[in-house]
Image: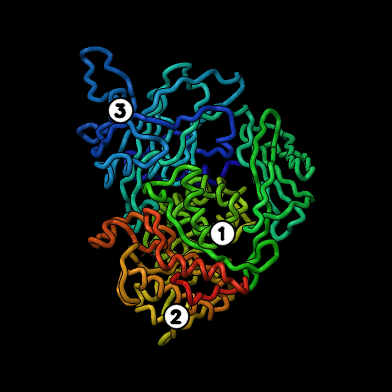
Amino acid sequence: MKPLAAAVRASVVFVGLLWSAPGLAAPTALEFADTRAGQSLDGDWHVIVDPYDNGLLDYRNQPRRNGYFRDAPPKDETDLVEYDFARSPTLKVPGDWNTQRPELLYYEGTVWYERRFDAPKAPATGRQFVQFGAAAQRATVWLNGRQLGAHEGGFTPFAFEVTGQLRPRGNSLVVMVNNTRRVNALPATNTDWWNYGGLTRGVRLVETPAVFIRNARLQCAKGDPRHLTAVIALDGARAPATVVVQIPELGERVSFQTDAAGHGTSTFEAAPTLWSPEAPRLYEVTISSGEDAVRDRIGFRTIEALGTEIRLNGKSIFLRGIALHEEALGRGGRATSRADAEALLGLAKELGCNFVRLAHYPHNEEMTRAADRMGLLVWSEIPVYWTIAWTDAGTLADARAQLAEEIARDGNRASVILWSVGNETPVSDARTRFLRTLVADARAADPTRLVTAALEHHPAGPDAERIDDPLGAELDVLGLNEYVGWYDGLPQKCDTLTWSAAYDKPIVVSELGAGAKAGLHGGALTRFSEEYQADLYRRQLAMLRKVPAVRGMSPWILVDFRSPRRPLPGVQGGWNRKGLVSNDGRKKQAFRVLRDAYRNLGNPGRVPKPSRDGLR
Ligand code: GCB
């Protein structure tokens, strides 16, 4: 299979000279990169901050022959070289640049990253790749002065093949990373989060055999917990090959043939203990073919939408959720490690959640892996946010590629149940066409999960709101962002408002909330006080209990997060304060309101009741 991501990537027209690279291979992505032989290239990288793209362009704005990507000392006195990575400062990889150096907090532009490494000889028939966990927002990569290719989109993995191009000693890997906001990028110019730039996730040199397992998906067949389906794609195959899937704890050993292009599918009987938030059982799985073998820890479960119900393993559930950004608790900046993920998701568990919305872009893989282990269902999304260039073919290709890369990466995560294709996108024909394409892609790439989007709502009379977005017809689950009581009236408005939907489908309230500064106290109508936020949560819970189709919620948001849209001095100071927890870890009153409601859940199919003593 030519993975969808690569196929779509090949058609992405990167805007502007910097990213156009005729004749270069489209980036690809490898699953299982972390478990393969190779070496980590994480650590200190030399950097040059280059707001004018001087390392690439000369004074006529033409590409320089002699740019920073050459990473070579002057040949002789006639060769003027005005940079030197070896004497330049360093930044840690993985990590955003904004929170590593105060002068880069607001920086938007190019930073050149450089790292030297030795490459022990790979087996004669083997192949080698450089894999990036993510580069925010776009990257062009050179190895030993030769351009490997470029990648657009700041949150998904990509790789370039470097077989035959490595030297035993002193390889130079140079990456031009750029986070300039653009109208036709995803996200576009206007968001409500920090524009973190850099090599925000790990980098790895990966070795594979000549024919290797590029994708291997193993999960319950749709709605059928007694059968598992394995979908395999080999890379480099020229003839049918045998694939063996083993799950030792289940005594399973299944073998089947791929076609000549390396594609193979097999459905077989199995009786796994099903994964659930209460018992997040994971199995060791080994998949091998020829010289290649990969390992994963996989949970098995089914997920379906039936009428207005969401059914996990055949049983109706209520998603007790919370939304979060990928920002490290306490430290700020991008969350990068397993410990960062466990700290954030640990708070969600403490809140009584069985569900998290990972907003507004694919979070790093530690998050979904931690969710698998900790028993949290996941809503995963791509940064199709607010208003983007709906009619731009390059933007659509970029969105399709980011979605495909996200699905390829997390296809084996039992925790992930929902792919979301957009957030609060104002209705128009062009927008609905764009999103329909993404819905169709998500279904084709992964028929086993549910597809959603965070929709807006519209007035339907006095005291009545309705979900009637035409995109709703295409979705399995209607996400609903509503800010009744914050942007939309005062909290009392919840007491009388009624809701309806044009579709007989489950509703997940993907956002609701109010700003509150931890430690700021006042009356229930004092904006930004903890009391206002807590009162709003109580009234929202009471309102949503009256809407039978509401089958889940992920209020906005677990932790305060950095946002340049939030300048209010003394209260926001560059932070969105809708967190239930402050960025330095203090729990606000509303945390307890929601926790008590989630813990007191009587009927698992309904919105929980706000408890009277939620202020404890
Ligand atoms: C929204 C957005 C979210 C914002 C939030 C807010 O509707 O989806 O990204 O941060 O509102 O706080 O206004």
| Mark carried by residue 418 | 1
Q: Where's residue 545, x and y in %?
A: 53, 78
- Please tell me in which quadrant of the rendered image residue 571 appears: bottom left
Q: Where's residue 26, x and y in %?
A: 48, 38
Distance Cα–Cα, label 2 vs label 1: 25 Å
- Please tell me in which quadrant of the rendered image residue 87 appears: top left
Is residue 254 shown above or below 570?
Answer: above
Quadrant, the C terminus = bottom left
**Label 3 amino acid?**
Tyr
Say which residue appears at 56% left-offset and 47% top-offset: 369
Q: Where's residue 564, x and y in %?
A: 28, 56
Residue of label 3: 68
Distance Cα–Cα, label 3 vs label 2: 56 Å
Instruction: Identify the element where label 3 is drawn.
Output: helix
Say which residue appears at 59% left-offset and 76% top-offset: 504
Residue of label 2: 465
